[in-house]
Amino acid sequence: MSKQYLTTHTIDNAHITDVFTLAVTPTQIISGSGSSSLKVHSTTEPDYPLVQSLEGAHKLGCHHVVTSKDGNKAASVGFGGEAKVWRIDGEGSDRKWVEEGKIIVGNKAGELWAIALSEDGQYLASTTYDGRINVWDTAANREKIREYETKGSYGTCIDMSVDGRFTASGHENGAVYIFNNDTGLVKPVRTVAFSPGGKLLAAAGDSRVIALYDVSSGEQVANLTGHAAWILSLDWSDTGEYLLSAAFDGKAKVWSIDQRVCVATHTETDKTLWSAKWLPKTGRSEAFATAGANRSISFYREATGG
């Protein structure tokens, strides 16, 4: 089965230079080019009239424009390295795009290249010349909230899933990376541990989140949340059914991997626990030990069992 499409309209000389990027909203199409202006055309009328020109948006031209699904927010990046966030202002026929603010990252060319907006426009993701992937919260003064590392190859393209959970990037060396935005492991990772069967990897640190990864695919499969302080130690039980964690605030937790929940929390001290380890199993009981800044070693045994 084949389909045919007919040309219904062409806007000749929409820009004075090559048009590099298009972004659409429910009622408009925004274009960027090697010239300094962004052009906004209506898509609700058959001749697609120009309804707004954002003059001087990017002095050296624009290579990427993106919009949120609801059409109320947009972002653009110029060849000079500057990035701008735009929002719709006004009502009815008076609705116009206005600059909401800039993203400041040193304004070096290539520091921001490809960009993507989450469905609601709150999060903006970008690639860089050295392979990093950055995510900003446009609702919080455009603060950077995530920075992912890749293998250093130029990030040429990027997208965010509709639900905002995942960011995918393509790179000059042919690599594709998929990141889970819920992970939180953009802060220092202080402990990693493979499961006994080698199928899962647990990682945690200053984010206070334990991330579980499928080793064969590299995909993150779960987040374990509940710690209120840095997580400094992880250890799997011999069977891989449970994961033990210890944190900066003196709390040790036991997590059920099947249920993905914390099943026990112990606090012998409010001082830092630097290490937590399962003990060799005797009988039917599980047991573990913790040690830390209180200069003590504490032992715990499951309340039931032989």
Image (cartoon, rainbow, N blue to C red):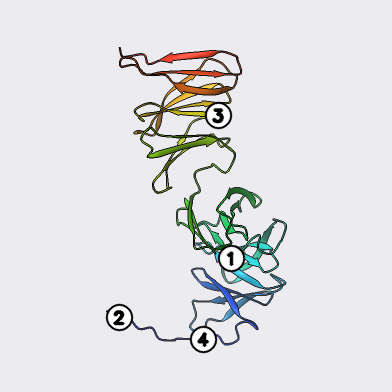
Position of residue 243 in the picture relative to residue 68 (left or right):
left
Q: Which dot, 3 or 1, sits closer to the camera?
A: 3
The N terminus is located in which quarter? bottom left
On the image, the x and y values in percent for residue 16 come to: 65, 83
**In this figure, which residue is indicated by the disc labeled 4?**
10
> Mark 3 is on which residue type?
Leu
Instruction: State which tag comes first along the sequence, 1 or 4.
Output: 4
Label 2 vs 1, first from the N-terminus: 2
Which element carries disc 2, helix, strand or loop? loop
Mark 1 Cα shell of 10 Å, populated few (<14), some (14-19), many (≥20): few
Q: Which residue is mark 1?
A: 91
The kind of secondary structure element at disc 1 is: loop
What residue sits right under mark 2 in the picture? 2
Where is residue 41, by image quadrant?
bottom right
Q: CA distance from mark 3 to mark 1?
A: 52 Å
Mark 3 and mark 1 lie on one chain; the one further toward the N terminus is 1
Q: Earlier in the sequence, mark 4 or mark 2?
A: 2
Whole-Å distance between the Cαs marked 2 and 1? 42 Å
Please, what is the three-letter code of the amino acid marked with disc 2?
Answer: Ser
Disc 3 designates what residue?
Answer: 232
User: Could you give the CA–CA distance between mark 1 and mark 4, rounded to whole angstroms?
Assistant: 29 Å
Q: Residue at x 38, y 37 (%)?
A: 198
Residue at point 52% right, 35% down?
204
Question: Along the horizontal axis of the image, is 6 left or right of 27?
Answer: left
Q: Are marks 3 and 2 in contact (CB under 8 Å)?
A: no
Q: Look at the numbered disc 4 and give the secondary structure of its residue.
A: loop
> Helix, strand or loop at disc 3?
strand
- Tell which residue pokes out farthest to the left in this image: 1
Q: Position of residue 7 (x, y in %)?
A: 44, 86
Judge by depth and name the residue closer to the eye, 221 or 82: 221
Q: Are marks 1 and 4 in contact (CB under 8 Å)?
A: no
Mark 3 and mark 2: Cα distance apart in space: 59 Å
